[in-house]
Image (cartoon, rainbow, N blue to C red):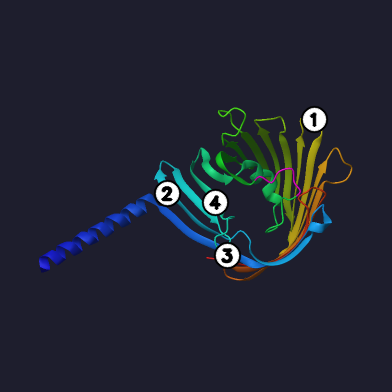
Amino acid sequence: MNFKKTSIALAITGIAIATSTFADDVKVETDVYASLRLGVASTETEDTDPTTDDRKLDVVSRFSRIGFKGKTDIGNGITAFGHYEYEVDAAITDDGNDRTRLGYVGIEGNFGKILVGQNWHTFYNHIVGPADIPWNFSGFAQVTYQGRSEETLTYSNSFGPIDFGVSLVMDGESAEDDDIDETELGLTYKLGSTKLGIGYISIADDEEDILGLSAAGSIGAFSLAANYQIQEQADGDDLSSIVADISAYGVYLHLEQFMDDTSDDPEASLVTLGYTWNLGKNTSVWFEYADYDTDTPSGSIENFEVILKYDI
């Protein structure tokens, strides 16, 4: 009986040692995380029909999420990785707005990084992202605010001060199912604390391609960023937008304006003013006021919210 116990103990010890050695050799890193972002929002909407104006006070969940990610050194200087992140509305039970935010796998090495699945697009990384400062109200008055979408293949790499990337969207929705639906190119040049970016989106179904330019940098405690986008329409009219950000000491001001060549006045504009207060480890609160003005049927919005954020 004692012999059996000793044999079992030695076997378990051997397995433990082997597993430990394997883990050390392979270098597997995994992480499970969550971010709960709940608070109170006062929102007033103004439709083109004044009788539909509405003001409401809600307890809201602002992009609360849970995620899983990991990476493994598979040898020869190559690392494999995967990331899944799911957005949940923590303030409402059985909410239909729950969705996958990120879901991709990839490999990286000296050749660069390759991602497949739902991930951050090249145009966002190089053009939109540098000026995407607000927690919630951003992207309402831009030519495109495309950040993530499914069915995307992305490649990125860096050479000295230059970062570049390309994203291919293949969702089978083009006129020809075997076509690439969308191609995105982006390049950023880093000069000290300043970054200058250029990006391009080519859409398969039409000629409404999008060109973007961005700049970001800092002066002392102040961070500055801006981007410009233009889209040539098939009828010859141009759509364009300009975005500007300034932030310091937790305070941020975000401005957007969307223009159409057919009108002398902006089609839409957005002003967002906010403050992020770090309360302690894993805990912060943001105060954000936004005024979105548009003549389109989507209607104008005035919003003020206070959101407590706790990371797990």
Comes first in the chain, label 4 or label 2: 2
Q: Position of residue 42 (x, y in %)?
A: 73, 66
Residue type at mark 1: give it.
Answer: Asp
Q: Position of residue 297 (x, y in %)?
A: 78, 48
**Residue at image location 42% in from the left, 47% down from the top:** 73
Q: CA distance from mark 4 to mark 1?
A: 36 Å
**Residue at image location 57% in from the left, 29% down from the top:** 177
The numbered disc on residue 36 is 3
Residue type at mark 3: give it.
Answer: Leu
Location of the N terminus by quadrant is: bottom left
* Residue wearing tag 4: 100
The outermost residue toward the bottom is: 279
Taking the image as drawn, is residue 150 in sight? yes
* Residue wearing tag 2: 72
- For disc 2, the neighbor class at 10 Å (few under 14, some 14 to 19, many from 20) is some
Q: For the residues carrying marks 1 and 3, which lies nearer the camera in this image?
A: 1
Residue 28 drawn above or below residue 6: above
Q: Secondary structure at mark 2?
A: strand
Comes first in the chain, label 1 or label 2: 2
Along the line of sight, the residue nearer the viewer: 23 or 269? 269
Q: CA distance from mark 1 to mark 3?
A: 46 Å
* Residue wearing tag 1: 235
Which stretch appears magenta? 141-146
Marks 4,2: beta carbons within 8 A:
no
Q: Secondary structure at mark 3?
A: strand
Q: CA distance from mark 3 to mark 4?
A: 16 Å
Comes first in the chain, label 1 or label 3: 3
Residue type at mark 4: give it.
Answer: Thr
267 left or right, relative to 5: right
